[in-house]
Amino acid sequence: MTLPAAASPFLLRLADGRVWEAVEFSDGFVCVYHPDEFTLCTIATSVEALLSGRRPNDPLRGAMIIPYEGVAS
């Protein structure tokens, strides 16, 4: 049995300056954590689906993807 490829973390800089953490899995599936909401995540089938068609008041509207550099140990 082979393991799937590792998930790729990234950051989303929202239009209001906040930064949310996200991860993209090997099949393109995306999960974004909302740090302002204790148990809320946004799930999408791809990064494109995550960011497209957002309404004017949606915090993800206009978000920019930032590659995740990780944390040095």
Image (spheres, helix red, strand yellow):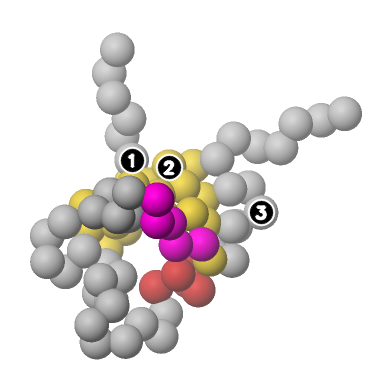
Residue appearing at x 12%, y 66% in the figure: 16
Between marks 1 and 3, how big is the CA–CA gap?
A: 19 Å
Given the image, on which type of amino acid does mark 2 rest?
Pro
Q: Quadrant of residue 73?
A: top left
Residue lying furthest left in this view? 17
Mark 1 highlights which residue?
Answer: 68
On residue 27, which mark appears? 3
Give the percent coordinates (x, y) of residue 70: 32, 30
Q: Number of callouts in the render?
A: 3
Give the percent coordinates (x, y) of residue 41: 43, 56
**Callout 3: helix, strand or loop?**
loop
Residue appearing at x 53%, y 66% in the figure: 44
Q: Are marks 2 and 1 in contact (CB under 8 Å)?
A: yes
Mark 1 or mark 2, which is nearer the start of the sequence? Answer: 2
Q: Is residue 40 shown in magenta?
A: yes
Task: Give 35 or 19, whichever is nearer the viewer.
Answer: 35
Given the image, on which type of amino acid does mark 3 rest?
Asp
